[in-house]
Amino acid sequence: QIRDWVPFRPWYLDEMIRRDGLGDDTNDPTPCCKMCPPTDSNRPASFRCMDCDGCSLLCEDCIVKDHRCRCLHAVERWNGKYFERTSLSALGLIVHLGHHGEKCSNAGRQVDKFIVGHINGFHEVNIVFCACVSEHDGLVPDWAQLIRYGWFPASRQRIATTFTFRMLEFFHELTLQAKTSLHDFHKTLSRITDNSGNCYKQLTVVMRQWHNLKLFKRNGRGHGSKDMDTMKEGSCVVECAACPHPGRNLPENWADAPSHIAWMYVLYLMLDANFRLKLKDRGFHDVDLIAGCGYFVEETKYQAFLREIGDQHEVNTCSAEHKAIRNANVPHGGYLASGTTACLCNRHLLVRANGLADLQKGEKYCSMDYILLCTLIGTSVAVFLTYDIACQYSKHFARRVAEFPPCMRLDAARVDSIRWAIPKKHWRVHGEKGHSQFSLNYLPYSGRTYGEGIETGWSHMNPVSMSTKEMAPSSRREVIDDHWNSWNWQKTLGFGTLFLRNLRTAREMCEKQEAIFSEFTRTFPSEMIARWQAKVERWEANPSLHDDPFVEDAKAMTLKDIKLKLATEEALDVARGIPSPHEVSASAFLQIGLELEDAQCALCVRAKERRSVADLATLQTKRNTLANRIIAWRKIQEVYMPCTVALLDTWTASNAVIDHVDTEEPDGEYNANNSDDDDVVQAHAEEIPLFLPSSLPFRLRSDNSLATLLEKEGRLRLAIADDSLTNIKRLRRTMAGISQFKQVNVSGAGQKSNTRIRNLFNKFKDRVTAAAMRYRAAYAALNIIQPPGDWTTRLQVLADKDITDPGKDDDEQPLGEGHHEISWIWRIARPVSNNSADEDNAEEFNQSMEIEWMKTRARVRRWSEEVQLIQEEMRRVIDFFEWKAKWWHQRVGQRENVTLALSSGLAGYAEKQASMYEELSLKFYNMWVPDL
């Protein structure tokens, strides 16, 4: 679009410059006013309005008459050379209050050069107040006349400055969205008005009053006769419609619901602190206009409690050094508040009523306790709480609660019923050992609760910290309250799309994880599944009394164990030996051919590595040995597969001569130059084709003489594929053990130890690569030998991304534990073996997979819970909106002895609010019903 515009740029610029002249009236030496009656058509026109779209030149009388109700428009006058700025008041416009702009027969005092702030700058206006005495209102004060006109006065007496409602509303929305400071906004208006006007102090006072009045209005504080005098703490907030509220959005018998339903009637909360929202000690003292009715706790009571509780020193007994504990004991000189602590609903991220408090010296438990108990006053539902250091914070919570005033205490049974968890990202810092009971991935009835959402709330608030830290204490709390109110309301409006998207995702993931879990479970004996099921259910019933089933013993894998496994692998390779090339059966012939193919795969892996001269000599020796084995095997192949002789001759003629391979000196050392031209192997041993039955061209493979060999090769290939997958899984588990061993015992131990363990890891990695090549070769052969066979229901194409551990890899799965999908290689059933050694290995492997099975089970449970919980939250949102609509309907007519005009305003606003909630309820209902 910009590229298309560039050729027209000069034209655009000309049109903009054209507006600084007379435009279409340039050809007329004396432009006439277009609004004057025909009798006065010769009156010269030299004025235009900059705020009226397409306004033509008018005469002085017409522009004043036309702007009688638009007195704050900016006008310009053509002085013969250019347009210069003037004002409507300078042209004689007078604003009359009290009679819809008409002149008052009983006019009061007139004020000239009255300052009015508007979104297009500051203006000097001439106004006349009304001095009429009405039957209902009596003599209306000057400040009330201005408010009725839509202008908010900066004072009540000797009024000289006022600001339009439109300007105040515009700045209010601007600062909530863009975090623009009032100082910058005022400077902008001054620049628009040729850098004139200095009403910053008056504007700060008016904005506090405006915020406060809007807050009370939105919460219905003006609709009751005593609402302003009997406001409860936390009553002027936007409440979360999706959280449980008895009497509003919960069933009447919710307290008697069975356990499989009652778990959804839980209040999910989270605690955190933000050390950016500081407050400097500048000696300011101002009036508190909210006094605990919003999100901040009542400051006087809070400070009295802190003085009474005294200094606390937080002790850390957790293995993780969290900054919440470290900063709790750090002094912050020069600040009245070192930060702000908050309590939000965990699943919907709305700030709770009385869920904010200023921190005096770090993230102290007493501050966290205070806001938690304040926000729980009046609630009766169970609580599920997440906190970065819940493992520490929960230890002596009951004892600390007992030190609070009786009106804030929780009974012992409710304290014991609180469930604690650590947010998912912070949980990793604490480590798995001893902390699974605080994991949202493993705790039952936690759904897919994240616990980290409060961080997005802090990112919403941090931009205002630069201005709020310079404010007076009460003003700062009111501004932060106002921004949180906007945050809560925007979250509420977004419930429709949020819950719908989350429900669809939860259902999709639930089905996917259930299928994965079912396949994974079928790979283990039923007796073992029953043991695992009982074990994890005992832990879920009481995590503190039973061993953690989600943590693998770190001592289970030592360096000696790893070396032993490697030595055992090498011994098995030696024990396989080289079969005699004489008097062998067809099956033995095929087995040897497949072993040669495996050896070629291993050499391919080894050849890709960067080696020293000594390693290259060893590699060549292995190639020579393999080539000799292939030559010996060829003699047997000529008996069983004579058709391959011609294929071999053709390949040999174009690639290599394999009559004899012997490149060793008598002393056994390799000499690259010690071979005759006739005996040189031009192709590496791993590149020599073996011409197994499955690799023959179709015309040769379809010969009846090879049918038996193909059938036997198919059976061997199937066994090789299963065996290769088993080896891959076993080796991947061993590699996971090596990684765990390195993290626990080797990290930071020096370069030598790290190099040794890395080399050991790479050896197992090479074995995995060789096993994967072996599987892929078998899979390709099976597709040729038995394309529609039963094996296709189990085996699949093996991609590199499929060769993973059963557990979640943080680098590969940025979405988190709940979205992890186990590769298909772990979900297929293991082949049954009659070998006792294989059965022992299978038992050992099954035991090693216990934790992965439990984690997979946990994923299914959490997603299933999430589906139920979201549906319950949807129901609660609809019920809450309907309750809120009824609440506003009931506010109509509650105030008595008021004028008809005020009564009309009270009823109109209440009905508008009720209609808004009814429309939201209907909108969300229609949006959600098709998916419910």
Image: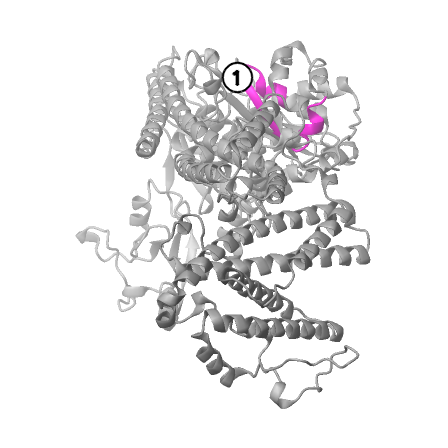
List x then y, in percent, for residue 29: 28, 67
Q: Mark 1 = which residue?
A: 381
Q: Which segment did they paint magenta?
A: 372-395
- Magenta highlight on residue 379: yes
Query: Along the line of sight, which residue is nearer the eye, 503 or 848?
Result: 848
- Magenta highlight on residue 5: no
Q: Secondary structure at mark 1?
A: loop
Query: Along the line of sight, which residue is nearer the eye, 913 or 432?
Result: 432
**Quadrant occupied by the N terminus:** bottom left
Q: Determine whether 375 is above or below 860 in the image.
A: above
**Quadrant occupied by the C terminus:** top left
Residue sitting at x 37%, y 50%: 51
* Residue 866 seen in render: yes
Residue at the extreme front of the image, as rendered: 583
Q: Is residue 612 left or right of residue 136?
A: right
Residue sitting at x 39%, y 25%: 875
Query: Along the line of sight, which residue is nearer the eye, 572 or 607?
Result: 572
List x then y, in percent, for residue 331: 79, 34
List x then y, in percent, for residue 921: 35, 27
